[in-house]
Each structure stands twice: as structure tokens, then as C-alpha cells.
């Protein structure tokens, strides 16, 4: 059984420590090796700092090897041959295991163009992204020179590692790798939080697909019991949050036009800070509404 | 040449008068006949009142014949055999000449079910409707009894006739058959009307299709030079009005997140009063917006 | 030394218990006497229930004596002769110790008119009120009959007692006698909470005086470090909350008109539920603002 | 009888022309003299341009004499000795004939300090100002040098002249010397314009006084029949516009708290462009409201 808590990692053999953290940085146990000598760690934050520091101190050759140890995004052959469990879960989280043909082609073009120019795979911390923003970042990064992309890749690898460490090691301190997306609905017709409103969050995509992220019903505080997205990064991308207000007001006997002026209200917005707290409320009457970026 | 102005209609021969107004009520010149004796008319409003009154005074048999003179909605065979020019233009205005197969089937079911129950075609003033609201009204009307539907049909025929009269006869007074849908954009970041914002109005449909109604760019008053819909009824139905605000703020050098929190803002609303004035404004900053039903 | 915690009250002698709680109900130790036999109490809520129940079970004569044990509001002679410390603090909290001559006259008229009609003093739980609402409630209560006013007086006495008990006895459970008034300022020009905004809350009065309740500066969350009113009932009455936004935007280099369109923004509102949570936020740009009753 | 229309001015004797326009520029008929030779004028705009041009071409000595021909603001001795009818009406319009002692002292200090430094009176087009903004402009202008203030004074004299010309000469074209302040109230609880709301506009003053500018009731469009200020410059200054919404909602049977959360809503704002169109609307429910600078 592998160590899971910080205490266990501090107390176990060097060998078990390295085995437990071997894939925090993809196929690169040497990073855990170096961190092992600095035990005990007071928390997961200093543990991550020690691993990151090992990467920063490594020779250019070793850093390049770390980069090359990563798989291509959405590469079918590599998926068949086997990714680390971590890579597989991460790519699946953003939907890279269920791409349409058009999307698959788009990703393959990205991989090939990038690898052709830089000689290593296009690396991005996919849990912080949507399919759209992965492709958008690629457009932005491709013109860079090799030195810049080496640095950007190491940064992305650090983000990937931080998320893996956060998931796999229990500690009292937490790495700041999670964001939150929340909403609430205020019924300014009655002056009360709007309870019982059906809310749906979908992720939009330039490639045309729409992916339902979550559905919820507002509670007596006009909020959802759980944040719309929480306990993980809020992926950079475009979203639409829809509120079924027509039904809400009809059920309360409020006089409405027929059909109701407002029925299903979409709020369309983008997320740019995956680790931030983004609050998107709705202030609504049957005849008006407002929203704003809250925090 | 047919008389076109009210003065011409007042002055021409009885025969020309009847010929000019023969199809104001579909294939029913007897209505124009009766109105002819009441010339001269002070305006198009009393002219319409005279024609409407002829219908109201007619025998039940004649009123039924008037109803039966109307074509089915979207009936391909009838379209091939020939509609009045008026019927054809009206049905085309709502898109009944370019239905998808699914839509065609839906309309055919409506026609057949209605005709089977009542023995006459399903009549609705299509210029006041979208495809959606035509089908929705059908669901509401089908459970009625024959007497009610006879009355409802006569009312719809009156609305059709009023719109035809408004289009065909020039007079100083106007029948109240037109509505207006307008918007304006206020940039509450700079405290000024937002000029140069691309606006798109689409009609939504339960059947899935989206129809672009109009596109415009806001002028220096933050308004569109022409109303989004004007000079005709605003069809009952669901709409989405989209504003390209991301580009607007970016062009003005306003600091934005990347991607911008707000880019393309959709306002989704329904129209319930085709002859009303509906104003749907947008008050917007890069981080907030509000709308309301104005007038 | 008097017992102060629930544990001490449960453990002390009957005599000490009664002494400690003798004035929870004004000059009426017999209520504490009756509650004493029910010790131990699991919390202050059941303790209060026991005392309240003693009042409810009391004879009409005893209840009337309880009512008559209360002082007149703002009566100078009685104040000179000495009120209980509790009565004195309560009356002072609402400003009854520093009335203008006009206000003093108004209260004296109220006391006299009420006492003349009912034969006992006008009792109201002043911590839940402003001077205005005390006089307003009087106008509403004076037309009542004696039975109603006896009942209303007992209820007000219960509210007074609950607040005294809450202040004097420490317990893990809390009586629901406190409300909260809070605000926050969102700068929708920059999409961030507005930090450093000077806020002032004043109590308005029909009698003309304005009383500053509190002043604060918004913190980095756009909120005040402490609620504007908290840890006590929010007195029923009219308030004005003023935000110095002109200076805030000017200091951030935002282009403004001269003088700025918005400088000091007043929000005027009333409180009707002293034990409720009332949140009055401000969403603001240099050219627009909005507020709503939040919770 | 003096000529009043542009046609009359074009056609009358040179002597009558000069007599009619002698005080457009205070006590300076030489300006009308020079303009007289350029008759006929196509409109009041070219007439004003001709008079302005005469001032611009004048010698420094003559321009200084023009400046010195103006009275002090609010000077009691000069008022007693007699101002031109124009000066008197202008000063009265801003309330300079009914100053409190403190205000009178403030204006006297301004006049004396200014005259002591520059050797001529402090001139400002008072119809474009409130008492506050006159004093505020003084603080801004006093540090200037003589050349600058000579220029500023000539500009202010031009504004005074334009307003006098606009009032005294009827022409088809109009000088752009008028602004407008308007409001409207939208009831977003019912989705309709709010009719029957009492509105009061007051001018605020740092010196403490409050002056009622106008009172009105909103009509069925939620607007006031006349603009709050129109047909004249909107004086630079601070204002408060108050809406009696509590009564409005109560009369419509809308459920409210007691006292109502919102009753009398004040909007406090400043005017900075006397010739601009400023629209200050209110969007309101019993529990929320918003305003913005419209146009």
C-alpha cells in the first residue's frame, strides 16, 4: 500500500517515498529522489517547492527529457499504448477521450505542428483548460522561440504536478490549485432569494460542441448547494449559465405576458483565472435582469 | 391600373372599387361590394370598419364560406395550384415556403387534425406569428368547440384583412397594425451611448431552427438607425438579441481579462404583443450588464 | 459576585439565581423564582422559555403589576428618581437620554395619552426601535382596546427580557434576538470589489434630527470589517447609507466629468425586521449604480 | 417699440438696430454698431458671430472697458444703484438676490479678492451656474494670471451675450445655448412605465441651503410632461432628485414590508455640461433600483 498522507510520506522508506511520487512529474522519479533527502516536510506546500526546485536546478538535458516524457494530447496511438493513469485521467477530464472527428483532427494538427517546430510535444495543464482554450493557447505559443517554449512547458508541467500532488497527498495545508465558480439568484420582484430555479452550466466551444458541465436547483438562499465548479481549477473557456425563470415566476402566480417576456435566461461569460473565485449572480424580475462579475 | 389611394378608391367606379379590394378578404369580393355603397370614406380606418361590419352582418353560411375560402398553411399542393398573391406573400413572410421536412410534417399534422375536427382550415394571421407560435396557438385552439373556432377564425381573418388593407391603400390615417422592436446600448463604463456595436436578432424555434431576422451596427446614439423590426407586426415568438461587446471594449483600449469576461452577450426574450412597442436595451460594462422591457 | 454563565446559574443557590435574574423582567423577581425550580437548564433558550411561561401562567393581576412596574419612556422625573440599570441603558441606546425639547415633548405626550387611556405606561422594546418607530407604533397602538394592549405589552416585555437575558447570561446556545445590517461595494467599472470607500450610516427621523450610527471604510473585499449593525437588533426605522465614490474613482485615475456625475451616493431605506439579516450592496461605475435588498 | 424678430432687425434703421442690441454686451453699444454694417443676417447664429467678431477685433483697451462695464456679483450697492435689466434678471435667476448673510459674505469676499488681484470684476455667466459652482470656479480662476483671466472673462461675456440674444431675438435658427435635464421611471416590478410618481428636484449647496428647482408627477409614459430643466442652460452644480415610490407601490396593492424598504428614493448627481442633454432615469421595484447617466 502506498503512503497517502504527508505523515506517511515523511515516515516511510526512501524507496516508498519515491515510488509514491514517481509520476507527480510524468515518468520522472528523479525529482522525487531529490526531494526525499529533504524530509520531513512541514506540509504539502514545502514538499511541492522542493520538487519544483529539483526541476529548476536540473541540467538543460534533464529538463528536456522531462518535457519529452509527456504524451501528445489526444493521441490515439499513445492512448492505446498506455498513458500514465494520471495523464489519462487529466486528458479525459477535458473530454480529450471523446473528441469528434473534426476535433480529433484539430488536436492532431496542433501536436504535429508543434512537435515539428520544437522537437517536443505540446504540453499544457489540461485540467485548467477547455478544448477551446487549449487550441487558442497553441495559436499563441506556436510563434514563440524554443527557449521560451521550454520555459513555458516547464511551467505547465509544474501546474500539472501541483494538481497531481494535491489529489494524491493528504495534508493540512493545501496547494492553491483550486478555483470556484458560483451563482445565486435574487428575485427583486419579491425581494427574496429565488429558491427552486433550475440552473444549467454548459461549456461552449468554437468547434461547435456544447458540453453540459452541471445542473442544479437553487436552494432557499437562492444559491446552489455546491458551487457550480469547485475543488478543482475552473477551466479557462467560454460558458453559458441558463436560469429557468419563467417557470419560477409562473409557479408563484406572478402576472406574466404570454409567452412570458423572460423564460430561460442565458448568461454567457468567460473564465480566465482557473484558480480564482468567480461569482456570477442573477438579479431578476419577470421584466428585467442584471448580472455582474462578483467574487 | 388599380386605384391605390383612398381618394382614388372614393372616386373610381363601383366595379373598380370592388376589383381593387376583392382579396382584402380572401376570394370574397362580396365584402367590398357591400362597403362600396358607403363611399366616400374619410379614411382607411372607417373603410376597414365598413368591410368588417359587412362580415359581422353576414349570414352564418356566408361567414363559413369566407372561412373555407382560405388555404391550408404550408400546403404544398395548394401552393402548386396557386394561392392569392396575398396569401402567398404572407405565408412566405413567416418562412412557410422554406420549411424543413420535420416542420412541414408538423404543419401538415396541424392542418389535418384541425380540418378533421372543424371541417374548415386552420386560419391564423401569420404575419403576427412565428412558426413556433402558430403551432402553439394551434395546441390551444384545437380543444375549442366549433362555435368558438368560427369566431376565432373570423377574428384572425379580420387581422389578415387589416394588414392587407394597410399595405394596399394609401391614406393619411393608418390602421393600428404595426409594432416596433428596438434596442439601444449604453456603455456605463464610459457613461456614453455605445456606438459601433454589432447587433444580431434571431428568431428561436422549438423545432430547432434559428432564423436571422436582422443585423445592425449601433450608431452614435447607441441605437440602430432603423428599429430591429418596424412597419409591420412584431411576430409573437422567442428571440435572441446578441451584442458583440468584447470587441467594442477592446477597440477602446479598456483593460479586459483574457479571454474577456463578456464577449458576445445574448438577451433572450419573447414577444407577446405584435402591435406593441417593445424596447430591449443593454446597459453594459466589461464586467456587468442589465436589460429590461422598456417602451 | 453574581453568577454569569449558565453553568453557574444551574449550580448556584436558589437565592443567588433569583438575585441574578431579578430584573430580567423589570422589578419582578417572582418570575425568576418560578423558573428556579426547573433547574438545571440545558441552555438559555429553555431558561427563557421557563421564565416566559411563568408570565403566561400568572394571574391577570400579576401580569398587570408586571406591566405597571415599567417606567415611562424618556420621563425626566423617573430618570432622576432612578431606573433599573437595564432600563436606563436601553433607553439611552435609542437616544432617549438626549432628546431635543421637541422630541421630549413628543414622548411626554405619548406617555400621557397612553397612560390616560389604559392606566399603565406605554411599553415598547426600545432596543428594536428608533425614536421614529416608537412614535409610529404608538399611533398604531393607541386606538387598541385594553385587552389587546395588555397582550401587546406582555409581548414587548418578553422581547425586553430576552435581550437582557442574552446580554447577561453566557451560554452555548443563543436567543435569536440579534439582526445584522451589512453592505458591500462592487466596482463594476473595473470588475472588482471597491476597497477604501468611505461609508456612513445615519438614522433619519421625522422629527428632523439625523444620528450617525457608524462610519467605516470598505476593505479589499469591498465590505466593512464589521457589519454596520450587528450583535444586536437592527432598530426599525429609516436609514441613509452614503458612499464616497467620487473620491474613489478619482484616486484610481478614472476619467470623470467635472464635477463628477456621481460623488456621494445616498441609499435611503427602512428596516422592518430587527432580527433579520439585511444586506444593502452598491454596484457602481462613475456613471451608474444599483442597489437591492440582499440577505 | 423695439424690433424683436430677425426680420425686423434686418429691416429697421441703424439707430433702432443698435438701440435694440445695445445691452446684449453689457453697456457696450459699439458692438451692435459694428455688426449693423453687416446686415442683413441670415439668422441669429451669424448675427451673434458678427458681434463676437467685433469683440475679438477690438483693441485691448476696449476689451478691458467691456469687462469693466460688468457689475460685481451680488453687490448690494450696485443693485441699489441699478443694474441693466439683463444683469438683474440673470443674477436673480441663480438666487443672487436672496442670499443668506453667510452667502452674501462669501460672494463679497470673492468679488473683492478678485478685483484686488485683477483690477476688474469677477465675471461669470451665472445662468450656467449654481451658487456653488460660481464659488468653485472662482477658486479655480483666482490663481490665474491677468492675461488668462482677461481671456476667460471675454469668453464668459460671450456666453452671457449669446443667452441674451437668444432670449431677445426671434429667429428660425437657434443658438446652442440650452440644455435639458430629464428623467423617467420604469417600474420593473410590473414591466411598465411608472405613472403618478411624485418627483422633486432640488439644488444642493455646500453653503448648506437647499433650493427646490421643480416638482412634477410622472405621466403614463413614466416621464414628466416637461423636462425637469429645459429651454435654458442646466446650471453646473449638484442636485438631488427624489422619487416617492413607497406610495406608488402601496397604491397598487404590491406587498411591502412595514415600513416599506424603499419609500422616498434620492438620486444625487452633478451637472457639468449646461448645454448637454442629461437623462437620469430610475428603474425600480419595491426592493431594488438602478440609475445611470443617459442621454
Image: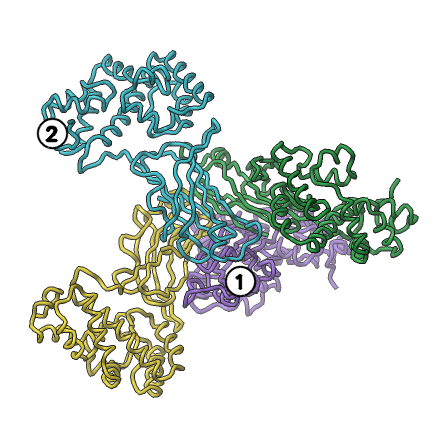
Chain colours: A cyan, B green, C yellow, D purple
Q: CA distance from mark 2 to mark 1?
A: 81 Å
Which of discs 2 and 1 lies nearer the camera? The answer is 2
Disc 2, SS:
helix
Q: Quadrant of residue A59?
A: top left
Q: Which mark is residue A10?
A: 2
Q: Position of residue A93 (x, y in %)?
A: 34, 29
> Relative to residue C38, is residue B35 drawn left or right?
right
Q: Position of residue B69 (x, y in %)?
A: 78, 45
**Of residues B268 and D176, which is closer to you in this image?**
B268
Disc 1, SS:
loop
In the image, farthest residue toward the front: B116
Residue at (12, 75) in percent of width and height: C18
Residue at (50, 57) in percent of width and height: A254
**Of residues C61 and C70, which is closer to you in this image?**
C61
Height in image: A241 above or below D93? Answer: above
Q: Which mark is residue B61?
A: none
Examine the rendering and report whether any part of residue B69 can be seen: yes
Tell me the crowding category of disc 2: few under 14, some 14 to 19, or many 20 or more residues within 10 angstroms, Cα based: some
Amino acid at each position: 500500500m502506498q503512503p497517502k498522507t504527508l505523515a506517511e510520506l515523511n515516515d516511510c522508506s526512501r524507496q516508498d517515498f519515491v515510488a509514491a511520487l514517481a509520476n507527480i512529474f510524468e515518468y520522472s522519479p528523479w525529482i522525487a529522489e531529490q526531494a526525499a533527502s529533504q524530509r520531513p516536510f512541514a506540509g504539502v506546500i514545502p514538499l511541492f517547492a522542493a520538487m519544483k526546485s529539483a526541476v529548476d536546478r536540473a541540467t538543460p538535458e534533464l529538463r528536456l527529457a522531462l518535457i519529452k516524457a509527456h504524451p501528445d494530447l489526444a493521441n490515439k496511438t499513445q492512448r492505446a499504448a498506455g498513458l500514465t493513469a494520471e495523464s489519462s485521467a487529466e486528458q479525459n477530464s477535458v473530454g480529450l477521450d471523446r473528441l469528434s472527428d473534426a476535433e480529433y483532427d484539430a488536436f492532431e494538427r496542433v501536436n504535429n505542428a508543434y512537435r515539428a517546430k520544437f522537437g517536443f510535444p505540446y504540453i499544457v495543464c489540461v485540467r485548467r483548460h477547455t478544448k477551446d482554450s487549449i487550441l487558442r493557447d497553441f495559436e499563441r505559443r506556436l510563434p514563440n522561440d524554443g527557449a521560451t517554449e521550454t520555459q513555458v512547458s516547464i511551467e505547465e508541467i509544474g501546474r500539472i504536478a501541483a494538481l497531481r500532488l494535491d489529489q494524491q497527498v493528504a495534508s493540512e495545508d493545501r496547494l492553491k490549485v483550486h478555483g470556484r465558480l458560483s451563482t445565486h439568484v435574487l428575485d427583486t420582484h419579491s425581494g427574496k432569494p429565488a429558491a427552486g430555479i433550475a440552473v444549467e452550466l454548459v461549456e461552449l466551444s468554437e468547434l461547435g460542441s456544447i458540453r453540459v458541465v452541471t445542473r442544479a436547483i437553487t436552494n432557499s438562499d437562492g444559491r446552489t448547494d455546491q458551487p457550480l465548479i469547485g475543488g478543482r481549477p475552473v477551466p479557462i473557456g467560454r460558458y453559458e449559465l441558463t436560469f429557468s425563470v419563467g417557470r419560477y415566476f409562473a409557479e408563484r402566480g406572478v402576472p406574466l405576458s404570454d409567452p412570458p417576456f423572460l423564460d430561460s435566461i442565458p448568461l454567457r461569460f468567460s473564465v480566465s483565472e482557473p484558480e480564482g473565485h468567480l461569482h456570477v449572480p442573477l438579479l431578476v424580475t419577470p421584466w428585467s435582469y442584471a448580472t455582474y462579475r462578483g467574487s
